[in-house]
Image (cartoon, helix red, strand yellow):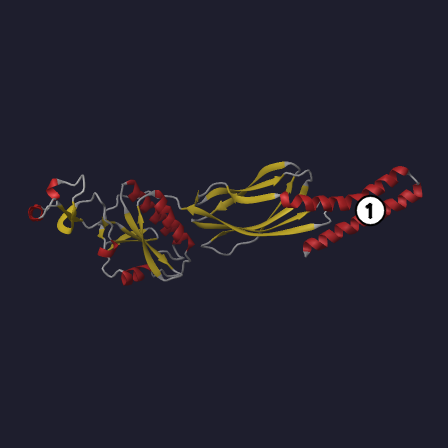
Amino acid sequence: MKAKYQDILYIIIYVIGIVLLFMTAIFYRQPLLSVFLILLLILPPLSIYGFIKALPLLKVILKPEYTEYESDTEGRLVLNVQNPTLLPLLNCRLFFTVMNMYYPDDYDRELLFSAEAKCNKDIYIPITLIGAGMIKINVQKLMISDPLHMYTKEIAFNEITELPVIPQKKELADLKFAKAAASDEDSVWAPDGELTRDIRDIREYRPGDRLKDIHWLLAARTDELPVKEYERAKELYFLLLPELDKADMQETLATFYSVAVKLLDAGEIYRVAVYHSHEDTVMLKTVDCTEALKEVMFELFRESVGDICPAMDRLKLIYPDAHGIIRIKGNSIREDS
């Protein structure tokens, strides 16, 4: 509505200018003033017509400069503006928000820019990334006026882009915690893992099987070569539990991330208990590489955080036999037996 009032104001000023020029042309009777008057009468419909034709070809894309950042750093958004037409669009306004999902309250931002004729340019917008979390960039709408500001078009976007902000790593002492054993239904069997002496199955011989694994007693009674398959040793792993609450959320994220990276650097495969507040449940995630760790961080970033974290209680309820849990809260790292 405000844009329409501004358009009306420009139209009124333009009409007043035409009337004054018309009266001046009559009074002085100058041919050149008559030419200017004709041009002023022709320009508005040409401006609006060219604007309507150019608008569908205009492309405006707002995105982060990089796919992720570290907390407490300066970041940049990149606004790519493409106007392949001959008509300059000098009054463009983009409305968007930049919000950390941990802190949902934010203010609307407005960026005024121009889209010159035959241009393809990038406009860099600095943003301060205070605290780790998932940044949500919501492009709401774009308002564009014709060169004479007589007609304004509003284009709704409602496009959301996520930008993860990873906490900065801390210097940690050597970790001396015991590994926890996987439950039977949750264990992961490695084909080249250590074998126990418990026979899991007997199958037919396959090329490459070891001779000592052949069940010679059964082979003596049959014409086949049955092979014994042994159970793998029960998997041992670190189980990390980040307990996020509002009071020390950022410290917990930084400590957890530092521990997780340190374990990966040591070649460890471990699990993380991620508390999902919207479902009030805990999911165990296996981390064996940097990408898997980032996926865990992104899951944590998308969850709402309350005053109290019930993650430990839910973990014990779902996995009552769980032990050796490494609980991380604030700057504290302790093992729960």
Q: Give, as a three-letter code, the residue at label 1.
A: Gly
Seen from the viewer's position, the closer of residues 211 and 303 is 211
Report x, y in % for residue 228.
14, 47
Residue at left offset 82%, top offset 41% = 39
Please tell me whether residue 276 is drawn above or below residue 286 in the rendered image: below
In the picture provided, is 88 more to the left or to the right than 305?
A: right
- Placement of the N terminus among the 4 image quadrants: bottom right
In the picture provided, is 70 more to the left or to the right than 200?
A: right
What crowding class fits label 1: few (fewer than 14 Cα within 10 Å), some (14-19), or many (20 or more)? some
- Placement of the C terminus among the 4 image quadrants: bottom left
* Quadrant of residue 277 within the rendered picture: bottom left
Is residue 168 in sight in this rendering?
yes
Report x, y in % for residue 273.
31, 54
Q: Which residue is disc 1 drawn over?
A: 17
Is residue 148 in sight in this rendering?
no
Residue at left offset 79%, top offset 51% = 12
Report x, y in % for residue 327.
29, 54
